[in-house]
Image (cartoon, rainbow, N blue to C red):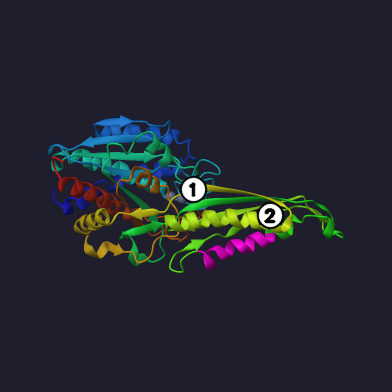
Amino acid sequence: MSDNKILKRANELFEEIRTIRRDVHKHPELGYHENRTSALIKAKLREYGVDNIEQPTPTSVVATIVGRKGEGKTIALRTDIDALPINEETGLEFASENDGVMHACGHDFHVSMMLGNAEMLSEMRDEFCGRVKIIFQHSEDTQPGGAKELVAKGVMEDVDAIVGLHVLPDENPEEYGKVCFRSGPMTTSADLVQVTVTGLGGHSSQPHLLHDPVLAASQMIVLLQQIQARYTDANETAILPITYIRGDSAINVVPERVEFGGAARTYNNEVRKVIEDQVYKIGRGVAEMSGCTVDVNYVKGYAPVINDKELTALSRVATADAIGEDRVIDLERPMNFSEDFSAYSDVSGKPGTFMILKAGNAGHYAPLHNPASTLNEETIPYGMAAMVATAIRYLNEDCSA
Ligand SMILES: [Zn+2]
Ligand SMILES: [Zn+2]
């Protein structure tokens, strides 16, 4: 089957996959609670006749499809399956039936496309050597994230390379169905910085007798913004917006305690370490200066996704052959969101590549994680073809490995 046949077959499966997509969209489930979703995935995988189905955790599903062209490598294709705690406001006829839960990050698209990939790859066993492992990962949008758990369960042990895809809504109609590639950094890290400043509260007429946690917290928040300005390379991205501050009191009462926090993001693991060290250092300095106690809780979240150069190049060529060079985009800049896909390569050291499918919108543009976010279903076959073409190209480069 040539690469063009991959897109042709993906197009033939379109209505079936769209039906699955709408079903999943209508029944979203939060991370770690994807019971209906994983049951649906297993039922479809059995129908498609994959070689093996496992559940490393209660709501994740891993399927294996063995090629018939002989021994070879193993490539993993990964999708996430969870939804978000958002009240859907799209007005779609297949809108969420679960109050307060919505597939607003496109994981319903991801699930259905990946089931389509499983169906295609099962049909195409004669066309490749080695094995494809399909990972339906639970809880991407709820930290600590399912990826780390699956890696800890050994899911990457027999895998040589891993490929992931995320949809992205788009305003521009001409960009629909294009697939974006980038070698090197693709998404940011996301570490949580949570700080509690405890002082000595009291009457605001006598601040000299107190240790004011409001002033200390204010100074620390400003100092945190100097990390990027003075401690990291100007060519590197490093942001740490503080998103909450709580110190409830009365207008004439200095409070005992102030809490604040935010997320630190960068594309570089070395910069990430600098940020972490500086946050602690600033905390110690402000404590010394103010007489307050400063408790810093720096929670390592998702690492940046760093796309492997060779695997990304292979995936790009395979995708261009399958869907046309005019539908391939070489991204100049990485995405400014984070993804726990990074855990698969980060922990295992295996090469990974993460692509973006420009998925338009269904008549009204809104970004991901927005209650009005919609996607254009016509883009489904392009995402499927990109992943299947990548898997087959990778495996057939090295038969009897
Ligand atoms: Zn998300
Ligand atoms: Zn997502």
Q: Amino acid at mark 2?
A: Ala
Q: Main SS type for the magenta part?
A: helix
In magenta segment, residue 169: no
Residue 104 appearing in the image: no
Which residue is at a point 44% across and 46% down the rendered structure image?
94
Label located before the other in sequence (1 or 2): 2
Residue marked by disc 1: 301
> Which of the two discs, 1 and 2, sits closer to the camera?
2
Per the image, label 2 sits on a secondary structure element best described as helix
The location of residue 134, given as percent across then percent down, is 30, 40
Vertically, is 258 above or below 127?
below
Residue 242 appearing in the image: yes
The location of residue 59, given as percent across then percent down, is 42, 33
Residue marked by disc 2: 287
Specify few, some or many for label 2: CA neighbours under 10 Å numbering under 14, 14-19, or 20 or more.
many
Vertically, is 27 above or below 86?
above
- The image's mark for residue 224 is none
Range covered by the magenta-colored residues = 218-231
Left or right: 251 in relation to 321: right
